[in-house]
Amino acid sequence: MHGEHADDGADQARDPVDDAATTRETLSRRGFVRLATATGLLLGMQLGRGERARAAPAQGTGESGAADALAPNAFVRITPDDLVTVIVKHHEMGQGTATGIATLVAEELDADWSRVRVEYAPSDPKLYNNLAWGPMQGTGGSSAMKAGFQQMREAGAAARALLVAAAAKQWKVPAREITIERGTLRHKSGKEARFGALASPAAKEPLPKDVKLKEPRDFRLIGKEQTRRVDSAAKCDGSAVYTMDVKLPGLLTAVIARPPTFSAKLVSFDAKAARAVPGVTDVVKVPEGVAVVAKGMWAALEGRKALKLSWDTKKDAGLSTEALLAQYKKQAKTRGARAVEHADTKAQLAKSKQVIEAVYELPFLAHATMEPMNCVAWLHDGKLETWAGHQVQTLDHQLAAEAAGLPLDKVELHTLISGGSFGRRANPWSDYVVEAVHVAKAIGGRAPVRVQRTREDDLRAGLYRPLYVHDVRAGLDAAGAITGWAHTIVGQSIQAGGPFEAMVKNGIDETSVEGVWPTQYGIPNMSVDLHSPKLPVRVLWWRSVGHTHTAFVIETMMDELATAAGKDPVAFRLALLGDKPRHAAVLKLAADKSGWGKPLPAGKARGVAVHESFDSVVAQVAEVSLTAQGKPRVERVTVAVDCGLAINPDVVRAQMEGGVGFALSAALYNEITIEHGHVKQSNFHDYRSLRIEDMPHVDVHIMASAAPPTGVGEPGVPPLAPAVANALFQLTGERVRRLPFARRAPKQA
């Protein structure tokens, strides 16, 4: 979710949102707050000084078990069995957030990493709000480490202080003489104790008013390589619980027959044959379509096949990708809402020695998560419980309560890990959660029900990265310097028509233009305008949001201008990054490590791109060849990243590697195409994901930094496609201006 934009730090300690109307109002003005530079003690801002906000007791423990634990705040629980449990308020979807949060807490505790466990927090925005957003609990915008860096360390430091105080009292020694190493407290007298032995007495100590954090030179876990991921073992041995793994008494499974086009309306349905399928228990109409409920997935699918449905699809008859592209190209030649306007743009372009003009086409993209959307809903005893990969708990909580017709305090969310999101699970409608509640309600709450989407359901239901067209005109003078830049973008607004509507200012959705404006380059006389057509296709952020398309356009145009100016692409960029030392350093590092400027064997070429997103800067150099069929093969990608302090370097590398693979899938193959309102793609055979043999070798180089951490989940995506496209030009002499590359079969120049 795109959550880096904000007001100031004033909202960080607000009370939780009390009702759905307040939530919508809060969202409409985007109450996401940028982490203040001078944060102070965020633990105090979060919990209130002197207030002991205990972490939730471990599942299955009673009050007595909780009473024996040290739980000084909402994030840490230390039990007599010597386990340190870190309560993770964010959603773990493979990006390593749980490991990062646990590392921050364990560092200040000096915990034994082998005794650290994680649990996922309940929905409670007062205790667990994302400090980068304001009074909301959720994950997105690559914000978890950035927003939690200070707060999580303070949570660990507070627990440490209580353990030391308890030991000092028991041993009758000064607290300053006690040291901690790997979960053991020691005194020079020879006395020592593990955390578990001191948990109960430490819980009786008064909370410290202030805590002292470690100096970076004293870090034992942060920035080190030995901290294995906390979720790997469970994922490897099958004990990790996903939504598909939830087991409840009498649990039923449901699938929904959904509209075949985006505006289709259900005219009628005949459920007689569906109800006759063995195992089918219910066929019910819900706002999303017709749900078939059964004792298992196979029966539900067979029941759905047996439904006789009549849909009115006339409204979408003229909706097609090619027609939209033609419409967008026409709009791109007209003036739109201005993101930035320089009075001299037109005049400077008119007198330029060269003007490069290009039109770019970028398709609708699906998220195609490995685990399709699903949710378990259980209405019982006057309350609702849900189990799902809840990425934005506050939204899911509010909208589930609305769908059930229950107050918030009668709704309990269980956040589970998920098999990917890339933005899909963080949507303003909480669609996969709400539909499960609708089905549970439609069967009268008779049993818990898991609504499970198939891959086909997911790919064809919308919530895509929007289709975009960019029209760019850029000029050069006789010395090869940029004189002016006119840029028009056409594409649906992600924020319009929903709770984020108020963030569209003067016709500009910042998520449509970010990466173009504001620009990382010192481009003179730049004007950028935007058209945001309205379509029945619902759109959503997709991993790296606006940067998914803007980086491709800016970075391929930069290469084109460098070629026209007769300059090296790296040197051309560096000249425009004079006031951006981070960008320049990252670009130089990637170029150096890739061997930029050194000759390659015949049939190979390099391309480069650098881009800032989510406060991190990533440069990539792609080494590309062509197959015998003339299609691109990416053999190596060199990545340099400045993400501030790398809390878990291995996680940073994994996210850069994963970003390369994810972006390469989109660059080579991915597009959602529409004909007469119908989505043509349905599964991985025609919405292809990168195969292992297609994955290039990836070298990741992390810039050393003592600055606070910034995002890593998304910034590895934007530079890949332009770097590959720029390498292809070196091989073929042809510019790539339409993605995916699979649409073209270039030949060796």
Image (cartoon, helix red, strand yellow):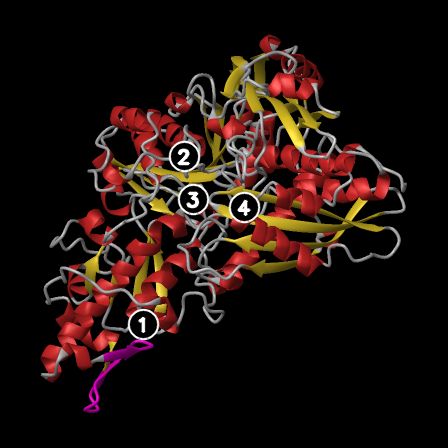
Instruction: Kindly identify the amino acid type of the residue bearing the numbered disc 1.
Output: Asp
Q: Residues within 10 Å of mark 4 (few under 14, many from 20)?
A: many
Q: Residues within 10 Å of mark 2 (few under 14, many from 20)?
A: many
Q: Which residue is mark 1?
A: 110
Rendered residue at 65%/10% (across/down): 317
Q: Is residue 199 visible?
A: no
Side of 417 relative to 47 (left or right): right
Q: Residues within 10 Å of mark 3 (few under 14, many from 20)?
A: many
Instruction: Kindly identify the amino acid type of the residue bearing the numbered disc 4.
Output: Pro
List x then y, in percent, for residue 410: 23, 36
- Of residues 372 and 173, which is closer to you in this image? 173
Q: Secondary structure at mark 1?
A: loop
Labels 2, 4: front one: 4
Q: Which residue is mark 2?
A: 433
State the CA–CA distance, disc 3 to disc 2.
Answer: 9 Å
Q: Which residue is mark 3?
A: 389
Labels 4, 1: front one: 4
Q: Which residues are magenta?
A: 179-192
Q: Which residue is mark 4?
A: 715
List x then y, in percent, for residue 122: 29, 47
Rendered residue at 37%/21% (across/down): 502
Q: Secondary structure at mark 2?
A: helix
